[in-house]
Image (cartoon, rainbow, N blue to C red):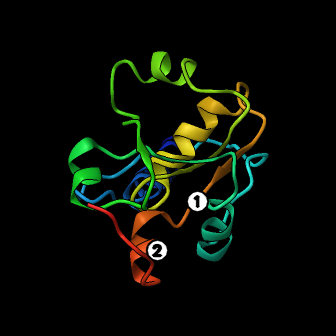
Amino acid sequence: MLDSVALMLSILLLAATAFGADDKQGKHDPAPPNNADVPKLSVEEFDKKRQEKDAVVLDVRTPEEFKAGHVPGAMNLDIGDKDFDKKLASLDKNKTYLVHCARGGRSARATAEMRSKFDKLYDFSGGFSAWQKAGKPVEK
């Protein structure tokens, strides 16, 4: 009985990992952390909010992904950078941050780290792929 429970838990864990968000390079992002208090934005909400005066579009993808194309005016801060926390600490806490990655996994991790330090924080969970799919402008 105990073996079958352990087996079921292992299967569930494997399934959760397998269905994690893929990034542009085909790797799986770990399951997003529970940060339900960070509002999620649709493409249209994100596009409207990014035009506000104090808004900063924070792209947490790799520099290579960013150079290949990004939301106009975005700033790149790779969540995989070993100095990510230090770079976060240097950001203006009075700005509104609109965080995104390729599809949503890395931005969920980034906003989970940021939520206790930034009051005006949003997660564009559709990410850059949703932005491109909607035909929005891309800067290189």
Question: What residue do we see at 79% from left, 46% from top?
Answer: 37
Q: Secondary structure at mark 2?
A: helix
- 82 in relation to 54, above or below: above
Q: Position of residue 100 (x, y in %)?
A: 50, 53
Q: Amino acid at mark 1?
A: Phe
Q: Amino acid at mark 2?
A: Ala
Determine which of the numbered discs, if any, sits on residue 130 in the image: 2
Instruction: Inspect this view and state whether residue 31 appears.
Output: no
Determine which of the numbered discs, if any, sits on residue 93 in the image: none
Identify residue for label 1.
Answer: 124
Q: State the residue in front, 13 or 73.
A: 73
- 56 in relation to 84, above or below: below
Question: What residue do we see at 70% from left, 25% from top?
Answer: 117
Name the side, left or right, on which 115 lies relative to 25.
Answer: right
Question: What residue do we see at 73% from left, 31% from top?
Answer: 94
Query: Please, which residue is most extreme toward the front here?
Result: 53
